[in-house]
Image: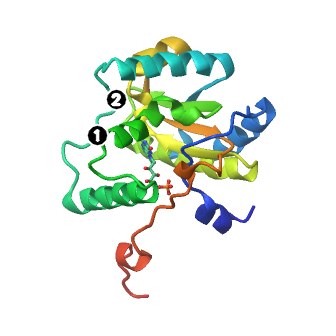
Amino acid sequence: MDIIDAIYGRFSARAYKPRAIPKETLMKIFEAAVRTPSWADSQPWEVYLAAGATLDKLRNANLELFKSGAPRAFEVPGPAKWPDDAQGRIERNMGERLRELGLDREDKAGRQKLVEGNFRFFNAPAVAFLCMDKTLSSWSSFDMGAFSYGLMLAAMEFGVDSVPAVMMVSYPDLVRETLKIPANLTILFAVALGYQDDADPLNKFRSVRRPADEVVHLFGV
Ligand SMILES: Cc1cc2nc3c(=O)[nH]c(=O)nc-3n(C[C@H](O)[C@H](O)[C@H](O)COP(=O)(O)O)c2cc1C
């Protein structure tokens, strides 16, 4: 697959067909993902992947915690407050997603259903939990982000779609216990993998981006 086609074709798929990803395909994807560059080749990534019966069990328990209203506790906190311009983009993205789905902003039940999708792991057949050693700094989080993008683009070569989602790690203790993740690792976020269901309205939305000439400040070009 052409790299530019992959970059433009990728999107966050939030509904999947009930079709397992063969182990060989998963390993080919991760063999490509581990080619990601990192600070001094430190390769901080540790991946705990759940599929099959393990994921079903985790999904059910995660959903139960969500429905019980258990407090969510990411291991890596988000910003106390988003800067205004980022906040504006977040709201615009959500507004456009809701509009695409025919949902009203005031439709609390509809919005809650969307949030719940995260806790079902979007019904994906595989979820990769991305972890790194607790003593590492935000430089290694940068490496982890790059790893996740390499992973998502490599997946496309094998017809596998994805969505990265921090909400999938709202209950890290459950994930840690189920997948026996050692105490020295932080669970940063997760990437759901699978074959997107293109008949599902959840997969119709395509996000927009700031134009490159607004982002890039050119000098001497
Ligand atoms: C670190 C990270 C965390 C994210 N967390 C969530 C999440 O919790 N739930 C969700 O539905 N999408 C999540 N996303 C997906 C973004 O919403 C999505 O990438 C963004 O809206 C752009 O859309 P696109 O991926 O379709 O291009 C996350 C993405 C990243 C990179």
Q: Are marks 1 and 2 in contact (CB under 8 Å)?
A: yes
Residue 63 position (above or below residue 200):
above
Q: Separation of disc 1 and disc 2 at Cα?
A: 8 Å
What's the residue at 41%, 75% (across, down)? 211
Residue bearing the label numbered 2: 74
Q: Confirm whether residue 12 shows in the render.
A: no
Point out residue 29 in the picture as x, y percentages from the top left corner: 71, 42
Question: Viewed as shown, does residue 31 lie left or right of 37?
Answer: right
Residue, x 64% and y 50% (percent of image)? 199
- Name the mark on residue 14: none
Is residue 206 found left or right of 65 in the rendered image?
right
**Horizontal and vertical percent for residue 126?**
63, 31
For this rendering, which residue is in front, 165 or 105? Answer: 105
Residue at which label 1 appears: 78
Indicate whether 57 appears above or below 128.
Answer: above
Could you tell me which quadrant the C terminus lies in? bottom left
Viewer-closest of 221 and 3: 3
Residue under the image location 32 percent in, 61 percent down: 92
Quadrant housing residue 191: top right
Residue 58 position in % (x across, y down): 53, 18
Tell me the element at label 2.
loop
